[in-house]
Image (cartoon, coloured by chain):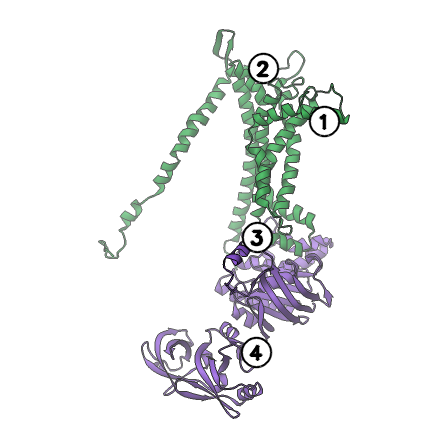
Chain colours: A green, B purple
């Protein structure tokens, strides 16, 4: 070994300190930050900035940008001639359609996740089933909407089948009833996302130590008690993650209702979502109002993110407090 | 408190579809190739077979063996966590093969503790009692009593994450004892602890056994744990029981070469030797020495009508003595262990370990020294070269 000045064969302390690999870490994350700043952070600030301006196109005339303060927000929360505050109506539409799709999505996903991860059942051909249930998530939402539009149209096979069975009248139109259109949108969202949720929940369940289930069984717990007292509490962080991301996705619901209702939120704007509302302003190049809607969506999304952060930080505080307690009294 | 009887228990893990096809294809391509591993059969991988054991009420039985010998599988079958392929399992005289784990009235301590991370120590211990819908006061009394026994009262409000390994293991034991089960199963409960803590916890388990007075079935791969804890030891290998006996029994009279090598630390020395029969007298020829066997051993060999033959001779390191004449050896390594020195020597082409007391340090040979050692016939273990069985059995 080559000896150094101190004769020990080790590098001098000064040289040891100068060796640092941290800079390479920073170097490798630069591309992400560049892309993030250019395409996310700056547009976010510009969106907030635009929301305080009157800035739209009227025919061939470009109006603004003129600073109007909170006028755009005020407009959003002002009732129209029919007495409806549109943003609340569209928020309600969005959340209702999300909820009726998300409820079966989570129930079915949880059941499938438990079914596939059960050591006792030891389901064969898991890889095949996982691929099949994930497939709908790979289909483009617009294509999926077109498929449903075709299936449920007045001349589509579903209509024909149901009329033939005598269950509906030939004059029935799926697209002229609030309940059926909302149902179709919820169904599409459910079909597209339950596979994804199943895979994530399965990963969560598989991350739980199998011996905990065995221990609970030996402790006298039946299947329900094992699920509610062991599986669900331990799966909660993953479950909350799925729930929050699904809610964020739900708030941003756009392509499915847009394509299915050709952008008009039929019938009677009962399926128009927040982002469809936003899109309407963007089509008129009304960046002020579009910005204000975006900011509201951002606040709602941020609030949900805050819930997750608080839950996680509460867990961290709990464990760090216990670690502090543990000092000095280890057996 | 219960008697546990295992009658001809067998456990086979069937092949999953892919494995079976592969093995079938391979058989077609290589029809002459014999299956070397006896545990792999056409029906699947055999984990445990021909397992017969009667465990008395309040007995502490230890299943010991190397990894993959089937000891944990056996324990899990008793717990009901694994199905029994064939055979009968009786607890308190009742066949429980198809009884659900929760209805067998057994508790189990897992190697990795298996504490519910989202519950406090108190709730972990109270979990099974709550499921039984016992009154709150009774649950509280039982949990606090168990915590007192295990000295974990001060940790009842904590979650398992905030405990050390030793504390977690105590909680796991506490969770099992609050139920006052008929049978207490322990699956390598000390394996995750460091050596010092393991020794302490071993002593704790011995004390605990005196206090809770139930039937214990304990699995370990550590022969020291097996020897110190068990009333009887079951030594397993490749799914078969090799020997059942008290610690003293298996140490003094190992049934075969495997048991002889597995039990005892340092391991038994083995030599290629010859057994000579002269009428009713038996001698062992080794390294030009003619070693006379004890009358007891001779009687057993005679009873089995053992003839002169090539044998594997086993002698424990603690039964070898340095001498002026005897079997010649060269010292390779000398390890000072405090009260004794472990000499690693080469004799008769084999690596041999001798334990030499450190009463007179000047008499301890150094590395490279030529020495002679001896042993008396009554400590010699005689194994068949062919069957590896102890010829005295």
Residues at marks 2 and 4, CA–CA distance in whole angstroms: 92 Å
Secondary element type, mark 2: helix
The label nearer to you, 1 versus 4, is: 1
Q: Do tags 2 and 1 sit on the same chain?
A: yes
Q: Do tags 3 and 4 sit on the same chain?
A: yes
Q: Who comes first in sequence, dot 2 or dot 1?
A: 2
> Residue A76 location, x and y as percent?
59, 17
The label nearer to you, 2 versus 1, is: 1
Q: Chain of mark 1?
A: A
Q: Which mark is residue B53?
A: none
Q: Which mark is residue B249?
A: 4
Residues at marks 2 and 3, CA–CA distance in whole angstroms: 54 Å
- The residue positioned 67% from the left and 69% from the top of the image is B7
- The residue positioned 67% from the left and 23% from the top of the image is A156
The label nearer to you, 2 versus 4, is: 4
- Mark 4 Cα-neighbour bin, 10 Å: few <14, some 14–19, many ≥20: some
Quadrant of the frame with the C terminus of chain B: bottom right
Residue on which the image places disc 1: A161
Quadrant of the frame with the N terminus of chain B: bottom right
Image-quadrant location for residue A32? top left
Residue on which the image places disc 3: B160
Horizontally, residue B232 falls left or right of residue A160, namely: left
Secondary element type, mark 3: helix
Residues at marks 1 and 4, CA–CA distance in whole angstroms: 81 Å
Residues at marks 1 and 3, CA–CA distance in whole angstroms: 59 Å
> Residue B349 location, x and y as percent?
38, 77
Q: Which mark is residue A75?
A: 2
Q: Who comes first in sequence, dot 3 or dot 4?
A: 3
Relative to A287, is A13 above or below? below
């Amino acid at each position: 070994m080559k000896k150094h000045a101190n004769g020990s064969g080790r590098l001098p302390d000064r040289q040891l300190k100068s060796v640092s690999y941290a800079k390479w870490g920073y170097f490798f994350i630069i591309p992400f930050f560049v892309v993030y700043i250019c395409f996310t952070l700056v547009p976010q600030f510009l969106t907030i900035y635009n929301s305080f301006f009157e800035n739209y196109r009227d025919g061939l005339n470009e109006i603004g940008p003129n600073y109007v303060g909170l006028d755009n927000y005020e407009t959003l929360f002002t009732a129209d001639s029919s007495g409806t505050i549109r943003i609340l109506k569209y928020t309600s539409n969005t959340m209702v359609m999300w909820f009726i799709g998300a409820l079966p999505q989570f129930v079915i996903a949880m059941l499938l996740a438990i079914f596939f991860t059960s050591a006792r059942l030891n389901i064969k051909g898991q890889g095949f089933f996982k691929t099949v249930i994930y497939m709908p998530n790979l289909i483009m939402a617009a294509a999926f909407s077109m498929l449903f539009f075709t299936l449920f149209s007045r001349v589509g096979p579903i209509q024909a089948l149901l009329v033939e069975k005598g269950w509906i009248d030939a004059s029935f139109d799926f697209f002229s009833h609030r309940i059926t259109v909302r149902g179709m949108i919820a169904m599409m969202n459910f079909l597209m996302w339950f596979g994804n949720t199943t895979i994530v929940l399965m990963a969560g369940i598989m991350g739980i130590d199998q011996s905990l289930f065995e221990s609970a069984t030996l402790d006298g717990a039946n299947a329900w008690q094992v699920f509610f007292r062991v599986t669900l509490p331990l799966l909660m962080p993953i479950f909350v993650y799925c729930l929050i991301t699904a809610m964020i996705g739900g708030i941003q619901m756009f392509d499915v209702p847009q394509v299915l209702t050709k952008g008009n939120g039929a019938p009677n704007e009962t399926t128009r979502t927040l982002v469809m509302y936003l899109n309407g302003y963007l089509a008129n190049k009304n960046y002020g109002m579009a910005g204000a809607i975006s900011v509201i969506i951002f606040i709602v999304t941020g609030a949900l993110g805050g819930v997750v952060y608080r839950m996680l930080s509460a867990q961290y505080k709990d464990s760090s407090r216990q670690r502090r307690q543990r000092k000095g009294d280890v057996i | 408190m219960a008697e546990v009887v295992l009658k001809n228990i067998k456990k086979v893990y069937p092949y999953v579809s892919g494995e079976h096809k592969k093995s079938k294809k391979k058989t077609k391509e290589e029809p002459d190739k014999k299956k070397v591993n006896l545990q792999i059969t056409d029906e699947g991988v055999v984990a445990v077979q021909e397992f017969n054991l009667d465990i008395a009420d309040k007995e502490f039985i230890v299943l010991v063996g190397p990894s993959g010998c089937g000891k944990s599988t056996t324990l899990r079958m008793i717990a009901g966590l694994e199905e029994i392929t064939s055979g009968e399992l009786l607890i308190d005289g009742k066949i429980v093969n198809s009884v659900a784990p929760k209805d067998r009235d057994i508790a189990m301590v897992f190697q990795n503790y298996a504490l519910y991370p989202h519950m406090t120590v108190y709730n972990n211990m109270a979990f099974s009692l709550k499921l039984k819908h016992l009154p709150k006061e009774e649950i509280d009394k039982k949990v606090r009593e168990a915590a007192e026994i295990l000295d974990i009262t001060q940790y009842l409000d904590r979650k398992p994450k905030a405990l050390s390994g030793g504390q977690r293991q105590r909680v796991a034991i506490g969770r099992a004892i609050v139920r006052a089960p008929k049978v207490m199963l322990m699956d390598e409960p000390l394996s995750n602890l460091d050596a010092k803590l393991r020794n302490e916890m071993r002593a704790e388990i011995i004390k605990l056994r005196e206090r809770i007075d139930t039937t214990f079935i304990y699995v370990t791969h550590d022969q020291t744990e097996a020897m110190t804890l068990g009333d009887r030891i079951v030594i397993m290998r490749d799914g078969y029981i090799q020997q059942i006996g008290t610690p003293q029994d298996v140490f003094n009279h190992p049934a075969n070469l495997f048991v002889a090598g597995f039990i005892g630390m340092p391991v038994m020395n083995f030599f290629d030797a010859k057994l000579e029969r002269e009428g009713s007298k038996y001698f062992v020829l080794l390294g030009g020495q003619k070693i006379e066997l004890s009358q007891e051993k001779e009687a057993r060999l005679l009873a089995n009508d053992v003839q002169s033959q090539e044998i594997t001779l086993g002698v424990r390191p603690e039964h070898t003595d340095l001498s002026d004449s005897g079997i010649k050896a060269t010292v390779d390594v000398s390890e000072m262990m405090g009260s004794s020195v472990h000499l690693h020597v080469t004799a008769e082409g084999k690596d041999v370990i001798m334990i030499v007391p450190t009463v007179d340090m000047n008499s301890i040979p150094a590395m490279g020294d030529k020495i002679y050692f001896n042993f008396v016939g009554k400590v010699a273990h005689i194994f068949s070269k062919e069957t590896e069985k102890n010829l005295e059995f």
